[in-house]
Amino acid sequence: MSVTHSLDTSTSRANPVPSPMKRLTVPKLKAMKGGEPIVMLTAYTARMAQLLDPHCDILLVGDSLGQVIYGLPSTVPVTLEMMCAHGAAVVRGSWHAVVAVDMPFGSYEASPEAAFASASRILKETGAAAVKLEGGEAMAPTIAFLVARGIPVIGHVGLTPQAVNLLGGYGARGRSEAEAAKILADARAVSEAGAFLLVVEGVMEEIAAEVTRSVACPTIGIGASATCDGQVLVTEDMLGLFERTPRFVKRYDDIANRVQDAAKSYAADVRARRFPGEEQIYRAK
Ligand code: KIV
């Protein structure tokens, strides 16, 4: 059963969908290797998707929604149900960007067959065009299995947040020669397995540059320098929703303070009976 519905623009708060606009496709994104940088941001809700969509090539329904939306301590507890619900909302709120959905921890690692069951559920229930999964050489057979069965896959190497318990934190990867060589081998394996895009997270600039030179698919950096074929950030990080800003994030707004200021003004108006005012009241004509 599909849970993706079109917006009823007459009753919804949402903006009307613009007149026929063609959505970007996976092959078109793949062909952007070495060309104009690919723009990717995370989105978890229909309204945010609508606002970001005209500016992005890809909207990623990241499992970072665990922390950003649900207040979880990491991405580890995120479920397939959460990813499907938010994925469907983002597809409903977009018309131009490719929508990709993260496969949550535990939904794909056990076997290629388990990964196919999870990935096909995501595509069926959300209408998204692709899935993303974390891991390098160990995940290459799974990626090849999915791609051979019609599922476009984005890889994710370097700092892989779902492995936080193994890594012991979110520090940048590739500081030793052995670690750098492993990241490069992971990237090559994922690309050769058929991933159409590769997220490279939290690595030294030289490693990102070497990975980008060595793989056939476009690379998308997060904390991985401008040498990648594109960039991604968690939208709420770049909007300034949180106090802590990781080094690799550039803040383009200060949304947390603006929300707090608005809530403070609203509270003051309600307490002083200034809201609702004449303009917000229904009266018989
Ligand atoms: O979960 C996420 O948002 C991600 C991106 C930050 C790459 O994986």
Image (cartoon, rainbow, N blue to C red):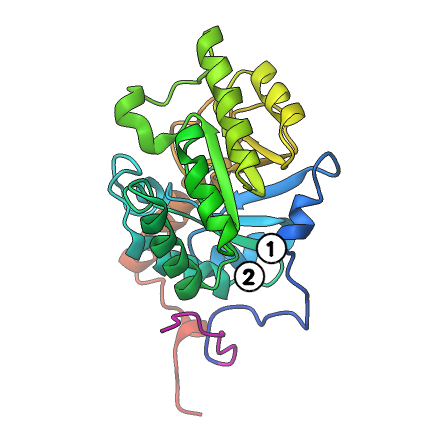
Image point 41% across, 35% down: which residue?
139
CB atoms of marks 2 and 1 within 8 Å: yes
Mark 1 neighbour density, 10 Å: few (under 14) some (14–19) many (20 or more):
many
Quadrant of the image containing the N terminus? bottom left
Along the viewing direction, whichever of 123 and 22 lies nearer the viewer: 123
Q: Which residues are magenta?
A: 1-10
Q: Residue at x 63, y 29 (%)?
A: 228
Residue appearing at x 30%, y 53% in the figure: 80
Disc 2 target residue: 94
Q: Is residue 153 visible?
A: yes
Q: Is label 2 within 8 A of ligand 1 (CB to nearest ligand atom)? A: no
Q: Position of residue 262 (x, y in %)?
A: 41, 49
Quadrant placement of the C terminus: bottom left
> Mark 1 highlights which residue?
97
Residue 186 or residue 264, whichever sits in front: 186
Amino acid carrying label 1: it is: Ala
Q: Secondary structure at mark 1?
A: loop
Residue 186 higher or lower than 116, as above or below: above
Query: Marks 2 and 1, how far apart in space?
Result: 7 Å
Figure check: 48 above or below 142 = below
Q: Which secondary structure lies at badge 2? A: loop
